[in-house]
Image: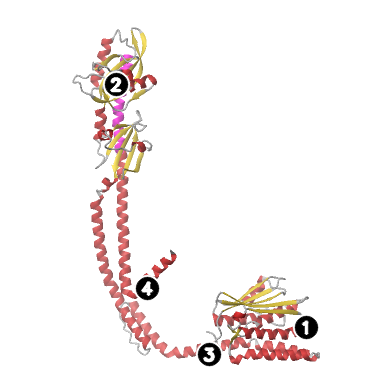
Amino acid sequence: MKRKIKQLYTSITQFFQRKGLQFTLLSTFTVVSIVAILIVTVGYTRQFSLKMEETTRKNNVDLLAQVNLNLDDYVHRLMGVSNTAYYKILKDADIAKNKTEVDRELSLLYSANESIVSTIAIFSSDGQLITSSPANQLREGANATEESWFKQANEQIENVHFSKPYVDNLFLTPNNTYHWVVSLSRSIQIINNGEVERGVLLVNMNFSGIEKISTNVNFGEGGYIYLMTQDGQLLYHPRQQLIYSGLMLENTHNASKYAEGSHLETFQNENRIVTLKTMGYTGWKIIGVTPIDQMQSGLFDNQLLLWSIALMVSLLLFSVNAVISAKITNPLRQLEEAVFRMEQDLTDIDIPIEGTYEIQHLSKTLATMAQTMQRLMKDIVKQQEQLRKKEMTALQQQINPHFLYNTLDSTIWMIESGRLEGAITMITSLARLFRISLSKGSNIISLKDEIAHVQSYLQIQEIRYRNKFEYSITVDPSIEDAATIKLIVQPLVENAIYHGMDYMYEEGEIQIRAYRFEEDIYIDIEDNGPGMTAEQITTLRQKKQVTTRKKGSGIGFSNVEERIQLFYGKAYGLEVYSEPDEGTLIRIRIPFQPLSEEDFDEGID
């Protein structure tokens, strides 16, 4: 995935590079402008939609709160009728002796609440109608004891019970019509001929009042309100007949689990806002439904106007960007053409001075620079080449006198002590040493010759130190013909002898290993000498001279690292691994490069 993204980025970059600065400026400014306009437009549209949704939610909550107040008032009035009928008319009256008075007072109570009450009736415990107002008779075959409101009243005698809406088929009405009612029933004690009996007080509420309250609420286009019990049974719905006939469904099951407030839901592939409020007296749930699609349909005109403005602003910005990019890039294009002519012929420096102040200043500076380049180019190249050769010569000459002095000193000592054969061996090794050191004046030799040079040096030192140390050399045959700077191993071996073996009371050991890892060559010079502390390593790496002994110094380390980095760059050089009493390992790292004829003549760049 990252590779594909990188390839896409590279392709886009190359595309703009081919098209030029004017196209890049024009397209970049235009894209940025259009993206900014799109972000603002989409953000504003989204914010407006969210604000409208939030306002709709708040309005729905407020509307349901008002509906709840109206329905609570309606139910409260019904409960007031029930309380008045029981506590002020029936509780202390003997129905058998004062039936006329009871009937009259019930009739007056009914007349006062006729708008909300359809029937006030009193039944005995066995379901016999004792009295009612208006004075309706029971339908033939009607049995009050089978009604749910009657059973609830007798089962829970201390509570007031509300039924769900149903068609009243218990009482005969004057015009023999059927009415939708909600029954409020309660168990009461009645006095009949001085005896206290249990009965049931029934107050039927006209359901049309509830329907009117729910219908008159403006819940927006496509919105509606419905009522249900706590367990999800439908009480009222504007499409109640369609639901009962199975032609429509309502999400009452999920709605019964909602907490009060607004909720987002998806029902039958329709997104809608559902607002819920619970009535205090009855526990009924008032639910308002607002389809989001219908709510957002009013946003279309606003969005159309907004996107039209965004399109016009985008076109205007494109035109402005085209003019500005052309004005900026035309002088730059002329400057580019002048530079191209300079690349072909440095004597052609006819550079136009046009455009903005910055471009004019750039043109003048470029003309001055071209003139200076004409005058100094050859001198600079020559000076750099000479400086490089002088640096290499000076660095290499730091080794030769020092090493020659030590070797000749050892040879003189051996001759004076009568060890002629050892002296001959040392002189022979010294001859081989200088033959390789000279290398026909080349600074680049093969790794095989560099190791042979070190071996000659070790033979000399082994004789000089009277077998005080042993050495071993291991070279990977596959890298023997690789190119290397000469005299990079011997100074480090010299330091290992002077700073390591010279301190040893036991036999010392020096190991030289040359091997290849990936694209580099590593040469390890390891000894079992006293090692170095972290501070000594830091001092060595900072190229400060180490003066722990009169013989030798840290100049070999600095010399080798400077020459390696001069030839190969800062990525290559020396690494030091050492701890006190644990010996020292110095690792040379150079790139693997085959030896060529050019290396003999000019060295490696």
Q: Can you give x and y, in whole percent of width and height, for residue 368 in the image?
A: 38, 85
Label 2 vs 3, first from the N-terminus: 2
> Depth-wise, is mark 4 or mark 3 nearer the camera?
4
> Residue beneath label 1, please?
466
Residue 47 picture location, percent across and down: 32, 52
Name the front one of labels 4 and 2. Answer: 4
Q: Residues within 10 Å of mark 4 (few under 14, many from 20)?
A: few
Mark 3 burial class by Cα count in 10 Å: few <14, some 14-19, many 20+: few
Task: Tell me how many marks there are.
Answer: 4
* Residue identifier under label 4: 14
Give the alpha-carbon distance from disc 4 to disc 2, as whole Å: 87 Å
First of labels 3, 1 by sequence position: 3
Q: Can you tell which quarter of the image residue 455 is in?
A: bottom right
Magenta residue span: 62-90
Label 4 vs 1, first from the N-terminus:
4
Amino acid under label 1? Answer: Arg
Q: Is 217 positioned to the left or the right of 433 in the image?
A: left
Whether pointer 4 and pointer 3 mark residues with C-beta atoms closer than 8 Å, the reply is no
Real-space Cα separation, disc 2 to disc 3, in angstroms: 120 Å
- Percent from the top left, x then y, of residue 408? 72, 90
Quadrant showing the N terminus: bottom left
CA distance for labels 4 and 1 = 69 Å
Q: Residues within 10 Å of mark 2 (few under 14, many from 20)?
A: many
Magenta-colored stretch includes residue 273 = no
The residue carrying mark 3 is 386
Q: Is residue 587 visible?
A: yes
- 377 left or right of 539 in image: left
* Circle 4: residue type: Gln
Q: Nearer the viewer, residue 458 or 385?
A: 458
